[in-house]
């Protein structure tokens, strides 16, 4: 495997260097549009040089772009391509030898194991929950259209949403790629006998029987997913939903740069749009009932919620 150089020697570049170092990968150095000299890292081997791009041998090095601004990212991408140097993502750097889809899926899962405790605590607060469950929330209005006889919550995390609908549900299936999250939910809801638990692989629902569920939903998780994994989930949703069942998805509406991944997208939003999601749902055999673009923090229309049906 080629050595890695990071393009971008600022805060993001240093963060990427530390992530790689945590996985046993020490970068060779940096490139940067504005900085020269050396960069001191807290981890990753101390000082790292800043190379001139034209001096880099494309046969020996891969470059990961550590730039947040999508326009600057694209400008740098074109510049690197002129020198015939291969660009990889942080996810591919961490999980070398994996396909881009597998690497992205595994990086997202790992990130949510190691770096999300603070977020999960904040997510339980009323202010965070009100985004989904206050009376004026478009999430709640669409959720009220679901038949909760047998409902699947996909990517349930630590189960923060369960308390909002458990009294109205007959049977609940909590699904997550992380065994840590499912174990947490089992302890949290140990006195509830209407909940089943399922650790899945991040792209299908193979343990669920065909036509066995009346509803499925996912909040604040699919925004990070790879588009190809989302399509797999949509096809699985079509399979597991009983006729007339509905599913509600909170997904990304981020189309600023088709090259983005979880590590580069604004607020971790992967590449997806309202229109693309509707297209994929249609191709999976589902009927799009309603869609709403959603602001997320200061990012206008960064997300979308889509209600689909199996008709």
Image (cartoon, rainbow, N blue to C red):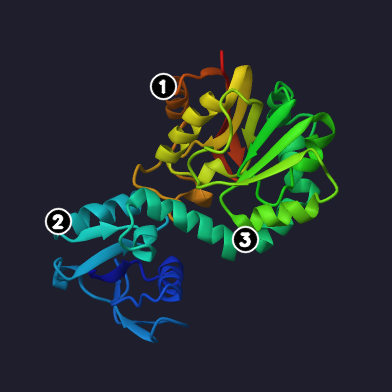
- Can you tell which quarter of the image residue 216 is in? top right
At x 44%, y 66%, the residue is: 12
> Neighbour class for label 1 at 10 Å: few (<14), some, many (≥20)?
few
Q: Where's residue 170, x and y in %?
A: 79, 30
Residues at marks 1 and 2 touching, judged by CB atoms closer than 8 Å: no
Which residue sits at x=80%, y=47%?
A: 126
**Displayed quadrant of residue 84:** bottom left
Residue beneath disc 2: 82
> Residue sitting at 75 percent across and 44 percent down?
129
The correct choice, above or below, for 301 with respect to 147 in the image is below
| Residue extending furthest toward the bottom | 46
Left or right: residue 192 versus residue 264 is right
Labels in figure, total: 3
Q: Which mark is residue 225?
A: none
The vertical placement of 133 against 282, above or below, is: below
The residue lying toward the viewer, choosing from 42 and 178, is 178
**Residue 283's disc number:** 1
- Could you say whether the residue bearing mark 2 is in a helix, strand or loop? helix
Of marks 2 and 3, the one in the foreground:
3
Above or below 147: residue 91 = below
> Mark 1 vs mark 3: which is more N-terminal?
3
| In this rendering, position of residue 33 left or right of residue 260 | left
Q: Residues within 10 Å of mark 3 (few under 14, many from 20)?
A: few
Mark 1 or 2: the one toward you: 1
Indicate the secondary structure of the residue bearing disc 1. helix
Residue 255 appears in view: no
Query: Where 285 falls versus 252 (above or below)?
Result: above
Q: Which residue is mark 3?
A: 116
């Amino acid at each position: 495997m080629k050595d890695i150089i990071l393009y971008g020697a600022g805060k993001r570049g240093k963060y990427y260097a530390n992530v790689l170092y945590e996985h046993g990968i020490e970068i060779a150095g940096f490139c940067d549009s504005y900085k020269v000299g050396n960069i001191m890292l807290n981890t990753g081997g101390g000082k790292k040089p800043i190379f001139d791009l034209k001096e880099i041998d494309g046969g020996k090095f891969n470059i990961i772009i550590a730039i947040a601004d999508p326009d600057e990212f694209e400008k740098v991408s074109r510049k690197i391509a002129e020198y015939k140097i291969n660009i990889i993502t942080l996810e591919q750097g961490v999980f070398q030898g994996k396909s881009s889809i597998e690497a992205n899926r595994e990086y997202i899962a790992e990130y949510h194991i190691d770096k999300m405790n603070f977020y999960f605590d904040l997510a339980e607060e009323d202010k965070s929950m009100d985004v989904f469950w206050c009376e004026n929330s478009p999430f709640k209005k669409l959720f009220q259209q679901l038949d909760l006889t047998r409902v699947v919550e996909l990517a349930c995390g630590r189960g923060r949403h369960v308390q909002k609908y458990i009294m109205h549900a007959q049977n609940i299936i909590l699904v997550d790629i992380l065994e840590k999250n499912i174990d947490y939910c089992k302890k949290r809801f140990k006195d509830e006998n209407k909940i089943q638990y399922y650790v899945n692989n991040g792209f299908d629902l193979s343990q669920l029987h065909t036509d066995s569920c009346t509803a499925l939903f996912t909040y604040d998780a699919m925004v990070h997913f790879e588009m190809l994994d989302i399509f797999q989930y949509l096809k699985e949703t079509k399979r597991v939903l009983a006729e007339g069942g509905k599913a509600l998805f909170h997904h990304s509406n981020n189309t600023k740069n088709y090259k983005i991944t979880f590590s580069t997208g604004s607020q971790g939003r992967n590449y997806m749009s309202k229109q693309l999601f509707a297209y994929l749902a249609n191709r999976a055999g589902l009927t799009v009932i309603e869609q709403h673009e959603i602001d997320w923090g200061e990012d206008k229309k960064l997300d979308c919620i889509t209600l689909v049906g199996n008709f």
